[in-house]
Amino acid sequence: MATLGFVARRAGHGLRQFFGSVILTSLTIALTLGVFGGFMLLQLNLEKLLRGWGDQLQLTAYLTHGVGAPELEALLARLQSFPEIEQVRHTSQEQAWRDFHASLGAQSGLLEGLPRDVLPGSVEIFVRPSFRDSAAIEQLAGRLKQQKELTQIDYPQQWVERLSLVVLALQWAKWLVAGVLFLATFFLVSNMVRLALLERREEIELMQLVGASEALIQAPLVIEGLVQGLLGAGGGLAILWGVYRVLRDDAAGMSELVPALGRIEFLDGLSIALVLATGVVLGASASLFAARGMVRSWHASAR
Amino acid sequence: MIRFEHVEKRYTPSQGALDDINLEIHKGELVLLSGANGAGKSTLLKLVYREEEPSSGEILVEGRNLKSFDGRAVAQLRRRVGLVFQEFKLLANLTALENIALAAEIAGTAKKAAQARAEQLLGEFGLASRRHDKPGGLSGGEQQRVAVARALVNRPMLILADEPSGNLDAAAAAETLRLFKDIRQQDSTIVIASHDVRLFEEIASRVIHLEQGRVVADTAGSGAAEWRL
């Protein structure tokens, strides 16, 4: 118990005495974890976007110009008979215009002067859950393209697949960048700790002479590294939160045009815990690495 | 208590510090190691607290061969040895009280008990009013008294002092001598390495003279009459 108290006091003493170095080390860790957290934030939101699109699984088929009411009724009946299709819903040119006008909100003045039939009529097609895989959707889209009343088929599956690749690439990039950054930060922080240790050489050598074991000398240094890592991780999350707030506010202005942008989310609890834990491990391990090397070399050189 | 058996210490093949040292220091002795600079006095002390290791030969402390000591055992040994250095080795950013208490806390004493013991020693050494002063604000003699107090804080079985009066003026050196007299009365085993034979000879029970790394004389000191085994 006395030893634990001693270690904690020495760590507190070191943090106060080398405050400048503590701030520098924490800032370095903050920047690294800010970048890492940024990748996590991007990945999290893209995955969420993907899930949203995947859940919808709705195809939009645009009508050729001049399709009359009887032909349209026949088309809808035909489509409804497809085994893959759960429901169809017709959107007229007039309705498409009104929807677009409403979605533009304050910017709807931009549409002034345009003819009201500029947008094509369309049919929204909802797919049964058992057919919501890429092969079935692809097959259905092919069959829809054969309908002479339909001119173009849009379906999110194509985008889901493309975006999935982007997310996968992002995931790899995140670990690649994180690996390089963590390694660079590890050596940078351990060199900063080395510099701080040089200033404490006299103190450490005296502690060795009066009977401090290697563990007793290293423990306060590791705790100092741990605290700096935690401060750095907290700083990194604060930077990320600031960036997130700016992005969220900017995106909110565009959310009527692109709804997904209005729902940007911050890191969840687990991700925040991961960033904090990474900071702690990075700070503590870099300190231990530096302390072990230096204290042992001083010990050896004393012989 | 301490036995050297054919101890040799070489820093390089051509640079020898100690050559075939055979001696035994008994419990309660106050031994003065004398000799010119470079005679091997400091090296001999460093071998006892394992700051240096012998090139050959054996050193036994309380019957245990230092060769068998791992890092943990060396730390344990040093907690039972009080060290006094010529350059005091006080930490500039700690007060006199904290410098003394640090050694006790490293030995596992709780903070309050360590501070109480440090306060007691500062009182005994006439430094009670300077306990919150940092080394920079103390005279050389006061710093040495703090260093001796630190050496005594864990009630060591052995005190090793390397040129304890080397950086002091005549008055402060005399003060240090008085301190060692007081310590001696507490029955501690003390080894002092000093080129100032005249100063410490009067309290030493034994004087070992070194020249070029060899023991050339081992005689009773003026304080031998007071030596109690």
Image (cartoon, helix red, strand yellow):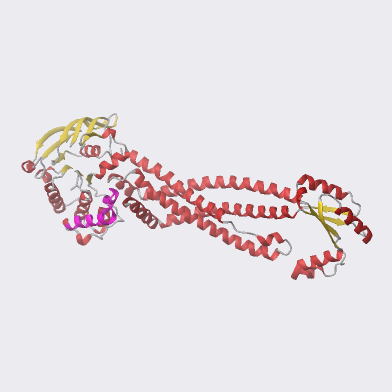
Number of numbered discs visible in the structure rendering: 0
Viewed as shown, does residue A217 lie left or right of B15? right
Using the rendered view, name the quadrant where residue A269 is placed: bottom right
Q: Quadrant of the N terminus of chain B?
A: top left
Q: Is residue A277 visible?
A: yes
Q: Which residue is nearer to you in this view: A98 or B17? A: A98
Using the rendered view, name the quadrant where residue A257 is placed: bottom right
Q: Position of residue A66 (x, y in %)?
A: 93, 60
Q: Position of residue A100 (x, y in %)?
A: 79, 65
Viewed as shown, does residue A96 lie left or right of B225? right
The residue sitting at 51% across, 48% down in the picture is A185
The residue sitting at 48% across, 45% down in the picture is A187
Q: Position of residue A25 (x, y in %)?
A: 46, 53
Identify the main secondary structure in magenta.
Answer: helix
Q: Which residue is nearer to you in this view: B104 or B194? A: B104
Q: Which residue is nearer to you in this view: A212 or A147? A: A147
* Residue extent of the magenta highlight: B101-123
The residue sitting at 75% across, 47% down in the picture is A133
Viewed as shown, does residue B32 lie left or right of B66? left
Q: Is residue B212 visible?
A: no
Q: Is residue A105 magenta?
A: no
Viewed as shown, does residue B144 lie left or right of A113? left
Q: Quadrant of the C terminus of chain B?
A: top left
The residue sitting at 36% across, 44% down in the picture is A215
Q: Is residue B117 magenta?
A: yes
* Vertical comparison of A239 with A213: above or below: below
* Vertical comparison of B48 with A47: above or below: above
Outermost residue, left side: B225
Q: Position of residue A105 (x, y in %)?
A: 75, 69
